[in-house]
Image (spheres, rainbow, N blue to C red):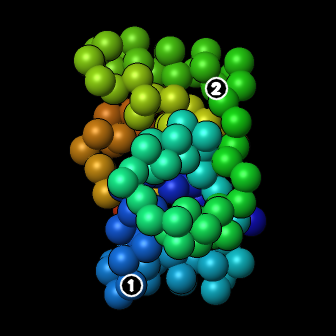
Amino acid sequence: MTRIHLDTNFLIHALQRGSGEDRRLRAWLAADVSVAMSAVASAEFLCGPVEDADRETARHLVGTPVPLDAAAAERAAAMFNAAGRRRGTLGDCLIAATAVNAGAELATGNLADFRRLSDSGLVVAADGADAL
């Protein structure tokens, strides 16, 4: 079964009806793709601003966020170091590591930020066709 983890910005855009992200997410759900989100990405999303209705929709779409565990923290640190220890990128590494450890592709609108982590095992779902 294909697994997709959503990055924060992907979810924000997916909640805008008719957006490309909305269409991709609907296609994945129709194809019975497993959709989830890391606790780190969920926290970023909940920092908002976000309406209560969007919080509820997100909760319905992705369920309980995937927690950050010790293995993901170790992988994130390795990704961060391998990618040049860029300021402000540890959160991306935590999100990416959680996806990799779950055997999931990452759906994001920040392709450039995450493609640099592909050497660490991250697969970026650039569009719906890539994930199906």
13 lies above or below 119: below
SS under mark 1: loop
- Direction from residue 69 to residue 95 in the image, left or right: left
Name the residue located 60 percent from the left edge and 51 percent from the top edge: 37
**Image mark for residue 72:** 2
Can you say whether 109 is above or below 101 in the image? below
Quarter of the picture holding the C terminus:
bottom right
x and y percent of residue 84 in the render? 29, 15
Q: x%, y% of residue 2?
A: 67, 64
Dots 1 and 2: beta carbons under 8 Å?
A: no
In the image as oriented, which residue stretches furthest toward the front? Answer: 52
Q: Mark 1 points at which residue?
A: 17
Q: Which amino acid does label 1 sit on?
A: Arg
Residue 93 x %, y %: 45, 29
Of tags 1 and 2, which is closer to the observer?
Answer: 1
Separation of residues labelled 1 and 2 (CA atoms): 32 Å
